[in-house]
Image: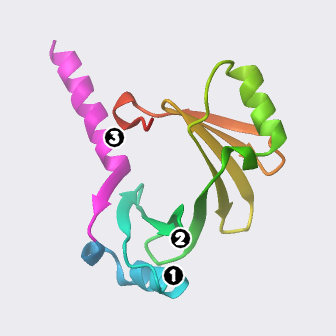
C-alpha cells in the first residue's frame, strides 16, 4: 500500500512540475517584454511554466494560439489551432489507417524557432505529431488527469 501511495505522489508531482499556471507578474521581464513586442495588442493571456520555459496561451484573431519562450525571452515555438481539414493528407491517411474509428478533436500547426513546421492531431488524450509533409514523427499519450476531450 505504501508503494502505491508513493507512486501516486510521484506521478502527481511530475504532472504538476511539467506545467504550472503562473501569474504574469511572476514572469521574467525578458519573457513579458518579448511577448509584448510580438503581440502588443494581446492583453488576455494565460501563462504556464513548462519544463523551465514559459508558455503564453491566447486568442489571436479568434484562433487559439500559444507561444513558448525560454527564460531569457527567446521564442522557441508558436502553435496555432487549425481546422482538421488543414492537416496534411498524409497525416490524415496515417491516422485513418493506424487509429481506425477515432475522431480527431483538434489540430494544430507548430512553427519552431528555426522555421520548421510540424502538425499535431489530438483526440482522447493522444497527440500525434507529423512533419510538414504529413509523415508520422511521434505519438504522445497524456496522463488521464490531463486529457482534453
Most frequent secondary structure within the magenta stretch = helix
SS assignment at label 2: strand
The alpha-carbon separation of the residues under discs 1 and 2 comes to 9 Å
88 part of magenta stretch: no
Q: Quadrant of the N terminus?
A: top left
SS assignment at label 1: loop
- Determine whether label 1 and label 2 are within 8 Å by CB: yes
Q: Residue at x 77, y 21 (%)?
A: 97
The residue lying furthest to the left in this view is 2
Residue 2 as seen in the image, left or right of residue 131? left
x%, y% of residue 23? 26, 69
Of the two numbered discs 2 and 3 on the same chain, state the one appearing first in sequence: 3
Q: Residues within 10 Å of mark 2 (few under 14, many from 20)?
A: few
59 vs 84: above or below: below
Along the line of sight, which residue is nearer the eye, 3 or 31?
A: 31
x%, y% of residue 114? 72, 68
50 vs 123: above or below: below
Q: Residue at x 63, y 40 (%)?
A: 121
Along the line of sight, which residue is nearer the eye, 20 or 71?
A: 20
Residue 20 seen in the current view: yes
Label 3 or label 1, whichever lies nearer to me, is: 1
Query: In the rendering, which numbered label is found on residue 60?
Result: 2
x%, y% of residue 27? 32, 74
x%, y% of residue 95? 72, 29
Query: In the rendering, which numbered label is found on residue 15?
Result: 3
Q: Residue at x 66, y 50 (%)?
A: 83
Based on the displayed image, in which of its 4 quarters is residue 82 positioned? bottom right
Q: Quadrant of the C terminus?
A: top left
The residue lying furthest to the top in this view is 1
Magenta span of residues: 1-23
Amino acid at each position: 500500500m505504501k508503494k502505491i501511495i508513493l507512486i501516486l505522489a510521484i506521478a502527481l508531482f511530475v504532472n504538476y512540475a511539467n506545467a504550472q499556471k503562473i501569474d504574469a507578474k511572476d514572469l521574467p521581464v525578458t519573457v513579458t517584454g518579448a511577448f509584448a513586442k510580438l503581440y502588443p495588442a494581446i492583453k488576455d493571456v494565460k501563462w504556464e511554466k513548462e519544463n523551465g520555459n514559459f508558455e503564453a496561451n491566447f486568442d489571436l484573431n479568434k484562433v487559439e494560439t500559444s507561444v513558448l519562450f525560454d527564460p531569457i525571452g527567446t521564442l522557441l515555438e508558436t502553435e496555432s489551432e487549425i481546422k482538421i481539414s488543414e492537416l496534411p493528407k498524409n497525416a490524415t491517411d496515417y491516422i485513418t489507417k493506424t487509429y481506425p474509428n477515432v475522431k480527431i478533436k483538434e489540430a494544430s500547426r507548430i512553427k519552431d524557432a528555426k522555421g520548421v513546421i510540424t502538425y499535431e492531431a489530438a483526440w482522447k488524450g493522444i497527440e500525434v505529431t507529423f512533419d510538414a509533409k504529413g509523415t508520422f514523427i511521434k505519438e504522445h499519450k497524456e496522463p488521464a488527469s490531463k486529457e482534453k476531450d
